[in-house]
Image (tube, helix red, strand yellow):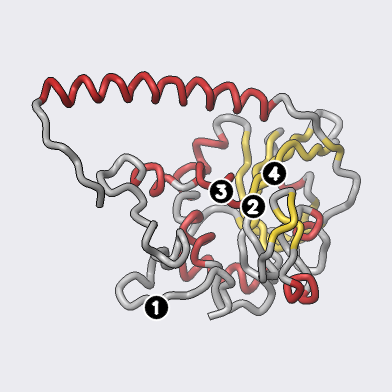
Amino acid sequence: MQHHPVVSQDEWLAARKALLAREKEFTRARDALSAERRAMPWVKVEKDYAFDTPQGRRSLADLFAGKSQLVIYHFMLGPGWIQGCPSCSYLADHFDGMTIHLAQRDVTFMAVSRAPLSEIEAYKKRMAWRFPWVSSFGGDFNRDFAVSFSKEEAAAKSLSYNYETVPVHAEELPGLSTFYKNERGEVFHTYSTYARGLDILVGTYNVLDMAPKGRDENALPWTMAWVRRHDEYEAAQPSCCGGKT
């Protein structure tokens, strides 16, 4: 932990006010960036995607559940995986509290994974989550939205992810995609984000960023090496984000 001078209350207040000015600049810049995000062009979704849900087979348009906006978290849980990715599970621990509030703003939120629905339901039960989570098993949805890859692509360690070619060895990666449905029932892809673009979903990180030691990850082999599934912290062993443990 870096050295911090110990000062008087007046000196601390002066430093805090100086930082507050910077924080306000950041907030205004973030608001402007969010406006640019919302102003991006859209792409009409022409492909007929189908998903397995607890209520039966559903189309992408059906997933909106009466809302005009749909936000999908691409959860790393591939077919045959015993459990989901620890990092995705860390993010998912934040989902239940926000879904009811998002619904008040005309937004349906859910997770989608390539694992069969029975495997999703089993892991969801273990984690005691309530947010909607459906399966794209057997379809192209995950691949088309650049979060699932073939064994050959993963073995090559060179994937097209987060709008660039990256040296990643994984068949599943995380992301978030947003959609809009108009009055005619047409669906449009409006935005997708990956990697560090998902940080904003993690309330825990936002609190840690205000704590004295921050995220405190600099000495770790990778940034999220400390993260465990919430039922594993007592006796957890380090594991990679691939989920096949």
Secondary structure type for disc 3: helix
Q: Are marks 4 and 2 in contact (CB under 8 Å)?
A: yes
> Looking at the picture, which amino acid does disc 1 mark?
Gln
Secondary structure type for disc 1: loop
Check disc 1: other Cα within 10 Å, few if <14, some if 14-19, many if 20+: few
Q: Are marks 4 and 3 in contact (CB under 8 Å)?
A: no
Position of residue 103 measured from the top left corner of the image (x, y, whole percent): 57, 36
Mark linked to residue 196: 3
Inter-mark Cα distance, 4 to 2:
7 Å
Residue shown at 45% from the left, 55% from the top: 93
Q: Are marks 2 and 1 in contact (CB under 8 Å)?
A: no
- The residue under label 4 is 192
Quarter location, residue 234 = bottom left
Residue 61 vs 67, above or below: the answer is: below
Position of residue 188 measured from the top left corner of the image (x, y, whole percent): 81, 37
Inter-mark Cα distance, 2 to 3:
10 Å
Check disc 4: other Cα within 10 Å, few if <14, some if 14-19, many if 20+: some
Earlier in the chain: of badge 3 and badge 1, it is 3
Secondary structure type for disc 4: strand
Secondary structure type for disc 2: strand
Earlier in the chain: of badge 2 and badge 1, it is 2
Inter-mark Cα distance, 2 to 1:
25 Å
Q: Is residue 31 left or right of residue 186?
A: left
- The residue under label 2 is 175
Mark linked to residue 237: 1
